[in-house]
Image (cartoon, rainbow, N blue to C red):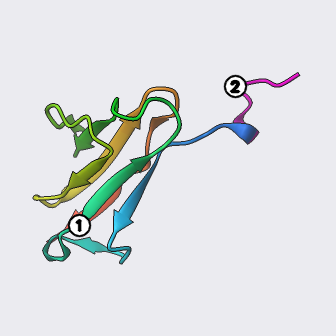
Amino acid sequence: GWCPLSPAGAQTTQILVEPPWTPAVLWDRVTLTCQGSGIAGATSWYKDGQRLGQQARDHFTVTMNGSYQCYRPGTGLSPPVEVSD
C-alpha cells in the first residue's frame, strides 16, 4: 500500500524566488512564494530563525536582508533563502 511517510514520495516545502537570480538582492523587489502541499494560507514565514508576525499568505515581499524560510503544516520548513542588500 501507499505509505504517506515514505521519504521518496514526500512532498517538501520550497521557496520560489522572483526574480530568480542568485543571490537574491533587495533592490530587485524580491518576492518569495512558499510552495508545498498542506494548507495554503497556513504558511508561516521566518527571518533569521524568528517568526514574522502574521504572514499567513503564500507570497511575501522582502523588505530586509536576511535568511528567509517558510513553514507549511504537512510539509514542514523550507530550506533557507538568503537575501542580501
Given this view, does label 2 or label 1 mark the residue nearer the observer? Answer: 1
Residue found 44% across the figure and 29% down from its top: 39
Distance Cα–Cα, label 2 vs label 1: 33 Å
Give me the residue at 43% from left, 44% from top. 78
Numbered mark located on residue 5 in the image: 2
Q: Position of residue 25 (x, y in %)?
A: 21, 73
Location of residue 66 in the rendering, given as x and y in whole percent from the top left corner: 19, 56
Q: Classify mark 1: residues with Cα within 10 Å, few (<14), some (14-19) or many (20+).
A: some
Left or right? Give the position of 23 relative to 16.
Answer: left
Q: Is residue 11 above or below residue 61?
A: above
The answer to whether residue 4 is left or right of residue 58 is: right
Residue reaching furthest to the right: 1
At x 69% / y 25%, what residue is drawn? 5
Q: Is residue 15 left or right of residue 65?
A: right
Query: Which is the main secondary structure of the residues drawn in magenta?
Result: loop
Splitting the image into 4 quarters, where does residue 9 fall?
A: top right
Q: Looking at the image, how many numbered discs can be counted on the residues?
A: 2
Is residue 31 rendered magenta in the image?
no
State the SS at label 2: loop
Q: Which residues are magenta?
A: 1-8
Instruction: Indicate whether residue 5 is drawn in magenta.
Output: yes
Q: Is residue 62 above or below residue 10?
A: below
Quadrant location, the C terminus: bottom left
Q: Amino acid at mark 1?
A: Val
For residue 30, the mark is: 1
